[in-house]
Image: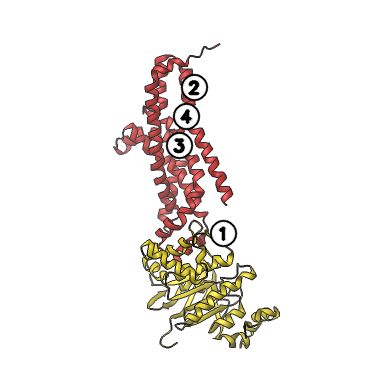
Amino acid sequence: MTGEPKIEIADLRKSFGRLDVLRGIGLSVETGGVVALIGPSGSGKSTLLRCLNLLVVPDGGRIRVGDERFSFGSGEKLPPAKRLAAFRAGTGMVFQHFNLFPHMSVLGNVMEGLVTVRRLPKAEAAERARAQLAKVGLADRAGQYPSTLSGGQKQRVAIARALAMEPGVMLFDEVTSALDPELVGEVLGVIRALAAEGMTMVIVTHEIAFARDVANRVVFMRGGIVVEEGPARQVIDAPREDATRTFLSHFHRGGAALAPAGS
Amino acid sequence: MYQWDFGILWSYRWLLLNGLGVTVGFTAAIVAFGLVAGLIAALGMLSRFAVLRLAALGFIEVFRCTPILVQLIWFYYAMPILTGLEMTAVSASIFALSLYGGSFYAEIIRGGIVSIDAGQGEAGAALGMTPGQSMRRIVLPQAVKRMLPALMNQSIIQFKNTSLVSVLAVPDLVYQSQVAAHDSFRPLETYTAVALAYFAILFPLTILVRLGERRLASAA
């Protein structure tokens, strides 16, 4: 992890109407780094993640992902739709509710970006899509439709769909929150494997134990600002700020929620 | 007691069949043009630009809130005087009926599009699709399935609305039946037969719509 960071954010601001959701966020993610965003509901962490691939367009501040730079604020023009689309093609995003395309097979879902956006021939796209499905352990489900899959399988297909575009960074938006507890592990396992491969990732999560285990750095947000940021184990095991302690105490009380897996 | 004599219609069979052909052809044209107009207006209603939204809304409400018979007469008689644009009865009829149908299709199409979860469009955008690609590949294919029964229903109404073009002397089934009735002095047989002809075509279509709705309900 040397050289300049993969992702840099400075003074990022976003309001929805009169509600200030992001109030000057700064953040940087090293190449190959894994950053977990934690914090209470409404803290702005999902909005921050959506700003990272410009699904939400910030009101102010600067974003750099790889070589792509964007500035926002008065006097700045919105990037044209084509440039936005090209930028998003290089950042993978996985959603809480999967958002698989129900009218396409599992294989079709994973091929879709390759065919429509990357303009690959169908055969080549199918081959790459199968490789991604194999990677998330779902090679045998290629011909099925999303409605026949379990939540955990759906989310793994969604991850394969994002990975098929060979993104430079992956963004995960509470990807286990809609899952039954017994299905969380299989999805976290896939993310863990990606971290081991050196994928740069930003993960919004309520799985504190997972964040501690897999992320290099943890960012605690509340009320649209970064309250505390640091190495994962330090922030979670020995937070400096009262607000962080208070938030994490909900998980401590849960007992098992903090038991570090396999250590 | 009235003595029915449907045999008399046999000699008018080619005239009536001809009229039926015009009616079916008209319907095909106004459904096709109407769907195009409706899709454009629906996308206009969903546009980011207020001007387009306003224009689409204006079009939809003007054509939805005035009677089709008045529109037909207006396009054929009033518009040439106001604009100098002359239209044949056929083109005025296709024009008015397509736009009238389009205003209803627009609301059906718009409703179908907004009924698709916003996450679908977001997933498309996150893959790097332009708004147009995501509409074409992701949103519309799902929305069309939901719209289909309502679109069919509206098209059935459009089929019957073509009967109004007879007032502009377009030789559709109703116009030809008027000719036959005047000639044969048998209006009861003629119009009964015409009613049966409309029914025979539309009734199977309504069954198709009902089947479609049932399949949709079980799929959801």
| Number of marks | 4
The red chain is B
Image quarter where the N terminus of chain B lies is top right
Q: Nearer the viewer, mark 4 or mark 1?
A: 1
> In the rendered picture, chain A carries what hue?
yellow
Looking at the image, which is closer to me, B134 or B212? B212
At numbered mark 4, what does the secondary structure look like: helix, strand or loop?
Answer: helix
Label 1 crowd (10 A; few <14 / some 14-19 / many >=20): few
Are the residues under badges 3 and 4 in a single subunit?
A: yes
> Quadrant of residue A215 in the image?
bottom right
Q: CA distance from mark 1 to mark 3?
A: 39 Å
* Quadrant position of residue A246: bottom right
* Marks 2 and 1, how far apart at CA: 52 Å
Query: Which amino acid, mark 3?
Result: Gln
Frontmost of labels 2 and 1 is 1
In the image, which disc is placed on residue B198?
4
Label drawn at residue B192: 2
Q: The disc labelled 1 sits on which kind of residue?
A: Thr
| Residue type beneath disc 2 | Thr
Q: Is residue A210 left or right of residue A34?
A: right
Residue picked out by circle 3:
B158
Does residue B103 show up? yes
Residue type for callout 4: Tyr
| Residue B65 visible in image | no
**x and y, in percent, of residue B104 in the image:** 47, 43
